[in-house]
Image (cartoon, rainbow, N blue to C red):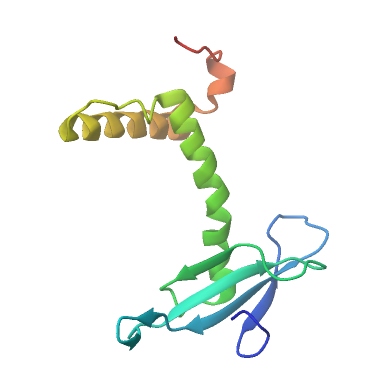
Amino acid sequence: LLSPKGAVSAAVDFRHGAPRADRLVSALVRLPGRRGVSPGVYRVFARRRPGSPGVGRIWLTSLVNPRLHHLLPLVQAHSGTVSALADLTENYGLRDFEGRSFPGWHHHMTLASAAYAYRRLVAGDPAEQWPQRRIA
């Protein structure tokens, strides 16, 4: 699927100051549906590292018109999402909602998210302000 035939690729720097540029390889695809081929067109793209056989992670999106360099922030956002969820889980009890009703769960998620957003946007780095303590 991500062979050079029919695919486009571009050199991109995934890290600023990286000694070598990776390649973002992309192609437009149709997915199989119940009755043959789906009506929609999708873009599949992957990161190919120099000297590595094949590709690493593969992404599928309905964003078919943007240029490849516009897709790069989507790829880079993944690591930020992972660290944000880890922070929310560890420091804000994101997963501590066992036994709550749906309204209680929703309230809990809203408060945890609001506290996280406040800390990130207004309060700055918590490591500089509050010591890490675990409550048992």
Q: Identify whether 27 is placed above or below 128.
A: below
User: Where does the C terminus fall, quadrant-wise?
Assistant: top left
Name the residue at 65% across, 67% down: 47
The image shows residue 42 at horizontal and vertical percentages of: 44, 78
Q: Is residue 5 above or below residue 57?
A: below
| Left or right: 106 in relation to 54 | left
Q: Residue at x 56, y 60 (%)?
A: 75
Where is residue 56 drawn, in percent x and y?
Answer: 66, 63
Observer-nearest residue: 121 or 71?
71
> Residue drawn at (78%, 66%), measured in percent from left and top?
52
Please report the residue visible at 53 percent of the width from the left and 53 percent of the height from the top.
Answer: 77
Where 35 falls versus 99 (above or below)? below
The answer to whether 127 appears left or right of 117 in the picture is right
Q: Nearer the viewer, residue 91 or 136?
A: 136
- For the image, the number of numbered tags is 0
Relative to 29, is 36 on the left or the right? left
Location of residue 112 (image quadrant) = top left
Residue 92 at x, y percent in the picture: 41, 25
For the N terminus, the image quarter is: bottom right
Tell me where residue 101 appears, x and y as whole percent: 17, 30
